């Protein structure tokens, strides 16, 4: 892809900037390395960014108890999900159109994930073909999953999951909360337009969606955009078409979580799409405890939306998640220093988590539970939510 760097955006570095002190520093620096419309598109959500703000605020509502005299010298951050073992709970979320941040796009993210043994979830809307991402990721054997958007034509959906299986992706993550997205006012005000050479590479050979003709009195939304939105029947069909485990991303309501668990999905990702779907949806972290209570202690749950630090990861694990997915920080680090930046960001998050665990007296992820947290402004040591089993072994 053509480099979009202008006089107002620096080219990506080949070294780590000396003033990076924590993972979140990449968010600040990214403004220097992305043209303004691209940065605003990545940083913004949808509508008035109410949910974007709620995601960040939710983490600030919890404090972590330090614990004394705990021996953590045998500590580690390993976990197992559905017979897959991971060295740490920091996964790369399926972020679309990564060439908006760096010319190499998803290729450099895959290199970083491979180097740091992080599970990368590659997006349907990747600006690089899933086969090319797989070639990079397979060099070190790091796990990779494929995120799926249902396509208007069933054969195109089948093509995507077949290609994923044939190129070594070990799970399908189907996103169900973004059939329609409100426009980002922040991106619109910055004049964002998708560059002509930044395209969904996985869909290049697919059939173009048919134009929808509305009858008099029909809604452009209900009878138009939502006409091809997936339903429960579509998810049931999908699960008969692949032998790969199917995860569902975009769950916020406990009733949906129970229904998905009963249907037999491999796991759930508690997510509000980083505030990019329904503006005014609850923060993912706020929804997490009720979903954990709904599905029980051992059902696999991941969380994304709003994570900026290792302490945020700790809080997510304490409230019921088994691992987390990193979205915007991934793009910010990619824009600053490509693969090196993303790898460094993952390293910082892992070290921040380990420091937090050590000071909280938790030697393993399994020891992190609700009792490690207290709501800010209170002094209760509540155990409203029972400890959950992170091992799934």
Image (cartoon, helix red, strand yellow):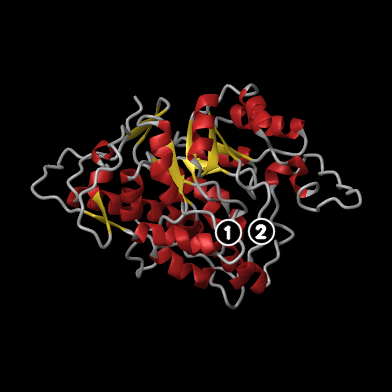
Find residue 355 and report its horizontal and vertical position in percent: 23, 52
- The picture quadrant where one finds residue 47 is bottom right
Compared to residue 100, the image places residue 288 above or below, namely: above
Looking at marks 2 and 1 on the same chain, the residue that comes earlier in the sequence is marked by 2
Find residue 37 and report its horizontal and vertical position in percent: 62, 70
Camera-side residue: 389 or 149?
389
Q: Is residue 76 in view?
A: yes
Q: Name the residue: 14% across, 50% down.
A: 67
Find residue 61 and report its horizontal and vertical position in percent: 34, 59
**Residue with the mark numbered 2:** 182
Secondary element under disc 1, as helix, strand or loop, is loop
Q: CA distance from mark 2 to mark 1?
A: 8 Å
**Residue with the mark numbered 1:** 279
Secondary element under disc 2, as helix, strand or loop, is loop
Compared to residue 68, the image places residue 193 above or below, namely: below
Query: Residue 298: which numbered mark, if any?
Result: none
Q: Is residue 224 left or right of residue 180?
A: right
At label 1, counting other C-alpha atoms closer than 10 Å, the crowd grade (few under 14, some 14-19, many 20 or more) is many
């Amino acid at each position: 892809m053509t480099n979009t760097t202008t006089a107002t955006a620096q080219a990506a570095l080949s070294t780590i900037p000396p003033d990076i002190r924590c993972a979140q520093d990449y968010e600040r620096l990214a403004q220097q390395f992305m043209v303004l419309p691209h940065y605003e598109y990545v940083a913004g959500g949808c509508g008035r960014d109410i949910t974007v703000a709620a995601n960040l605020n939710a983490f600030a509502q919890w404090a972590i108890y330090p614990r004394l005299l705990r021996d953590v010298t045998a500590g580690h951050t390993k976990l197992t999900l559905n017979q897959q073992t991971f060295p740490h709970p920091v996964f790369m979320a399926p972020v679309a159109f990564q060439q908006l941040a760096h010319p190499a796009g998803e290729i450099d993210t895959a290199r970083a994930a491979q180097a740091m043994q992080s599970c990368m979830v590659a997006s349907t809307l990747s600006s690089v073909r899933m086969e090319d991402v797989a070639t990079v990721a397979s060099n070190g054997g790091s796990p990779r999953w494929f995120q799926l958007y249902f396509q208007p034509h069933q054969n195109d959906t089948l093509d995507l999951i077949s290609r994923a299986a044939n190129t070594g992706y070990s799970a399908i993550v189907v996103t169900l909360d973004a059939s329609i997205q409100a426009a980002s006012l922040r991106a619109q005000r910055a004049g964002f337009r998708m560059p002509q050479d930044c395209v969904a590479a996985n869909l290049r050979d697919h059939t173009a969606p048919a134009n929808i003709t509305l009858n008099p009195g029909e809604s452009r939304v209900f009878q138009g955009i939502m006409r091809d939105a997936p339903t429960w029947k579509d998810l049931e069909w999908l699960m008969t078409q692949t032998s790969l485990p199917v995860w569902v991303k975009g769950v916020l309501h406990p009733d949906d979580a129970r229904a998905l668990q009963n249907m037999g999905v491999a796991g759930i990702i508690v997510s509000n799409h980083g505030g990019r779907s329904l503006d005014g949806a609850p923060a993912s972290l706020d929804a997490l405890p009720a979903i954990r209570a709904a599905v029980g202690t051992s059902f696999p749950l991941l969380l994304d939306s709003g994570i900026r630090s290792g302490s945020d990861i700790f809080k997510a694990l304490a409230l019921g998640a088994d691992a987390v997915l990193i979205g915007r920080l991934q793009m910010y680090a990619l824009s600053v220093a490509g693969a090196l930046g993303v790898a460094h960001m993952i390293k910082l998050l892992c070290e921040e988590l380990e420091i937090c665990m050590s000071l909280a007296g938790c030697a393993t992820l399994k020891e992190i539970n609700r009792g490690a947290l207290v709501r800010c402004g209170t002094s209760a040591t509540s155990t409203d939510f029972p400890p959950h089993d992170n091992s799934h072994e």
